[in-house]
Amino acid sequence: MSTIVFAAPPLTLEERYGTLAGAGNTLPSMGLLSLASVVRKSGYKTAVVEASSLNLSYDETVRQILSFSPDYVGITATTVSIFHAAKLAGKIKEGNKNIKVIIGGSHITALTKETLEMFPDFDFAAVGEGEETILELLNAFDNRGSFDDVKGIAYRKGQESGVGSRESEEVYIQINEKQDLIKDLDSIPFPAWDLLPDFPKAYHPVAIRCRKYPAAHLLTSRGCPHRCIFCDTSVFSRKYRAFSAEYILEMIKILYNKYGIREILFEDDVFVIFKKRLVEICEGLLKENLKISWSCLGRVHAVKPDILKLMKKAGCWQIGYGIESGDQKILDFAKKAITLEQVEEAVRWTKEAGIHTKGFFILGFPLETEESIINTIIFSKRIMLDDISANLMTPFPGSEIYNIADKYGKFNKDWSKMNMLQSVFIPNGLSEDKLNYYNKKMLKEFYLRPRIIGNYLLRMLENPRNAGNFKRRS
């Protein structure tokens, strides 16, 4: 059988988090671990090189990849890391020009043709959900079959690309039919954590999101039915699919018993929406008597006091809510389908249940004004949040706002700057200096308050890593 290595390209914490690099997240890519488990189950030799998480240089990343003598290398990339992925692909080709490089992830799915045209060292693209696509593609490689019938891929077709038969054929980007979504997610084998060197010791979440160590994260569903204009749903679609409670509980038991994991971070945007599954997960955790703590993300309209109390009892200590703005006009434009009253109510109920709250905010929406930003700052301090994240609006490829941002302000489409740390979009009537000023103002005014400082002092007793994190935020 052939060998395939899955890799995340080198991307430093400074490039990902700026001044908060010291408190950055180094958890592995769940997508790569899922793909690796799928191809291994089908008999392929596989390995995972997490260059970003392990802070590897390009030379060390290539050395590790080539040490497996792979026939294929699959690289995952977001928009901010696509240039890093292309550089890695080029260096792999320098080491062995016969290796086929497959690029996957959110960026290539959103801008398939443009990306392949810009980066010639990507041989093939896996567009959308990757598990079925990668198996079909590897089968076509190994059996010298036609790529025309492989769903979910894009590639250069023609004589110069090595794909195609007619010498006079012009090279062009072929984008095949979309891959069908996986209906039964439980059919996917458990993530290949065993392929990660020094797991879980070498991989850490953001300190502020963790109470216990070691920690791991899980993605327990795919797709999001909501229509927020700033989200890219091109990979998993707007059709919601979920792993069952039984599958999730079994994953947690493996992490707990085999790897000693004591904290779980559920990364689903819609983890709390489907109550029956959530209740089953909570009751399962209580029945198994696993001594873990966990956190999750939630929609403010989806929580109620009874479910919050059950979540707390089952070990949940923090919920992060996508609030985005403290101005209703901005929320309506962003198609959040929530009200400020719902936000305030959900935060209050969560606090009453004894669960910490975090609010995610975005500054610099279209139609944003100094008044609406000030409203957001005031609102963030008025409701009972324990933490906030305040990022600058970044119209990512694949989102609705990517296509309309130019109508509402100045939009710099330089992919390398799309990290939510730089002002790539400036709404009409505002300036980059103003956005940066209010971003810093919001963080300082939120964190430099007696209640928040006292809260952090208590949390530092539980987790000393939070000391440095608080200093950087304030």
Image (tube, rainbow, N blue to C red):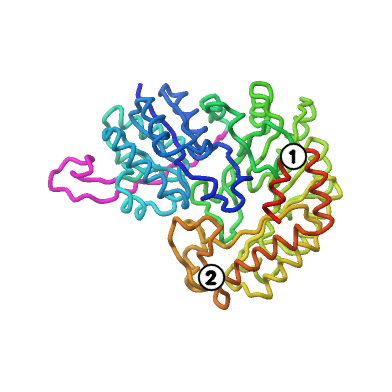
What number of labels is visible? 2
How dense is the environment of label 1, judged by Cα within 10 Å: few (below 14), some, or many (20 and up)? some
Look at label 2 and name its amino acid.
Ile
Q: Quadrant of the N terminus?
A: top left
How dense is the environment of label 2, judged by Cα within 10 Å: few (below 14), some, or many (20 and up)? many
Quadrant of the rendered image containing residue 329: bottom right
Position of residue 17 relative to residue 373, above or below, is above
Mark drawn on residue 426? 2
Residue 347 screen position, x and y as percent: 79, 54
Which residue is rendered at x = 73% and y = 43% of the image? 275
Residue 362 screen position, x and y as percent: 63, 61
Which residue is rendered at x = 29% and y = 37% of the image? 94
Residue 55 screen position, x and y as percent: 51, 38
Look at label 1 and name its amino acid.
Pro
Queried whether the magenta region covers residue 228, the answer comes back as no
Query: Nearest the camera: 328 or 206?
Result: 206
| Position of residue 431 in the picture relative to residue 276 (left or right) | left
Position of residue 209 relative to residue 200, above or below, is below
Residue 123 screen position, x and y as percent: 31, 42
Is tag 1's residue or tag 2's residue first in the polypeptide sequence?
A: 2
| Position of residue 172 in the picture relative to residue 469 (left or right) | left
Quadrant of the rendered image containing residue 111: bottom left
Residue at the disc numbered 1: 464
* Stretch in magenta: 156-185
Please tell me whether mark 2 sits on a helix, a strand or a loop: strand
Q: Nearer the viewer, mark 1 or mark 2?
A: 1
Q: CA distance from mark 1 to mark 2?
A: 38 Å
Which residue is rendered at x = 45% and y = 66% of the image? 412
